[in-house]
Amino acid sequence: MLVLVVDTATPAVTAALVEIGADEVRQVAARAAVDGRAHGELLAPQIDAVLAEAGAKPRDLGAVVAGVGPGPFTGLRVGLMTAAVFQAGLGIPAYGVCTLDAFGARTTGKALVATDARRREVYWAVYADGTALTGPAVDKPADIVNRLTTYGVTHAVGEGAQRYADVLGITPGAVLYPDPLALAELAAERVRAKAPTEPLTPLYLRRPDAVEPAARKAALSPAEQSEAGAKLTAGRR
């Protein structure tokens, strides 16, 4: 079955086509462009490119897999909304995978996965031979150092681990962004079983930066407003 994979939970805007068979998961085509402020502009062309490389059309897709974060609000929802459009438009199932799990699935031993959450924070989780021990969570790097020691973490991956390596006290690995093939592998059993489509619930872990504006304050006091109203009424006579 040909499956579309998308992830926009990190600055890497990722799209891939994978073939999920009875015994294997094979990557057919993939694109990734690193730009944390252009998810909306980049994802659709990435999808077009992988479809063109594979000589496939949207109607050839049997399912869509999306990384559900954690990730910053604006970027993350681009991928999830796109996946939801394919699911609804083509009538195919959609499956969500924690983006940190895609990193963790490729680790051995006790590993920290940390992506950049902005605000000098990281989204993070700890894995033991690919199985999550804790998280996902969002914290300042200095606030998780003691917990990493408790878990016996020896290595780390992800852009957040690289950015804050000096604070975390762990030498980061070379892997900075999620592997779309790992996302597909984590959803493969659901795809093979033709499980019901899932709600693509984003792991924001915190409220978005954008908030509704407060009610505007009156420029004039109540007394001044009454006086202005009286003058306006008088002027109309």
Image (tube, rainbow, N blue to C red):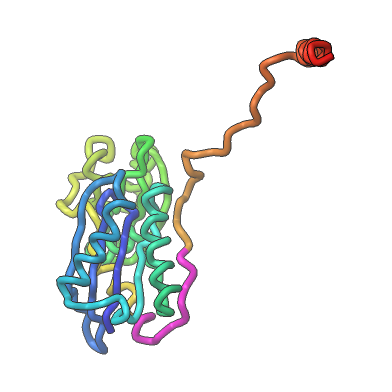
Percent across and percent down for residue 100 are 33, 58
In the image as oriented, which residue stretches furthest toward the bottom?
22
Percent across and percent down for residue 25 are 22, 79
The quarter of the rendered structure image containing the C terminus is top right
Q: Please give the range of residues in magenta.
A: 189-200
Give the overall secondary structure of the magenta segment.
loop
Residue at 29 percent of width and 63 percent of height: 102
In the figure, residue 133 lies in which quadrant?
Answer: bottom left
122 or 216: which is nearer to us? 216
Q: Is residue 195 magenta?
A: yes
Residue at 45 percent of width and 51 percent of height: 204
167 over 233 or under it: above or below: below
209 or 141: which is nearer to us? 209
Residue at 42 percent of width and 55 percent of height: 77
113 over 15 or under it: above or below: above
Is residue 66 at least partly visible in the picture?
Answer: yes
Is residue 154 at least partly visible in the picture?
Answer: no
Q: Is residue 175 magenta?
A: no
Percent across and percent down for residue 64 are 35, 73
In the figure, residue 212 lies in which quadrant?
Answer: top right
Percent across and percent down for residue 21 are 25, 86
Report how many numbered discs are placed on residues in the image: 0
Q: Is residue 197 left or right of residue 168?
A: right
Residue at 46 percent of width and 77 percent of height: 197
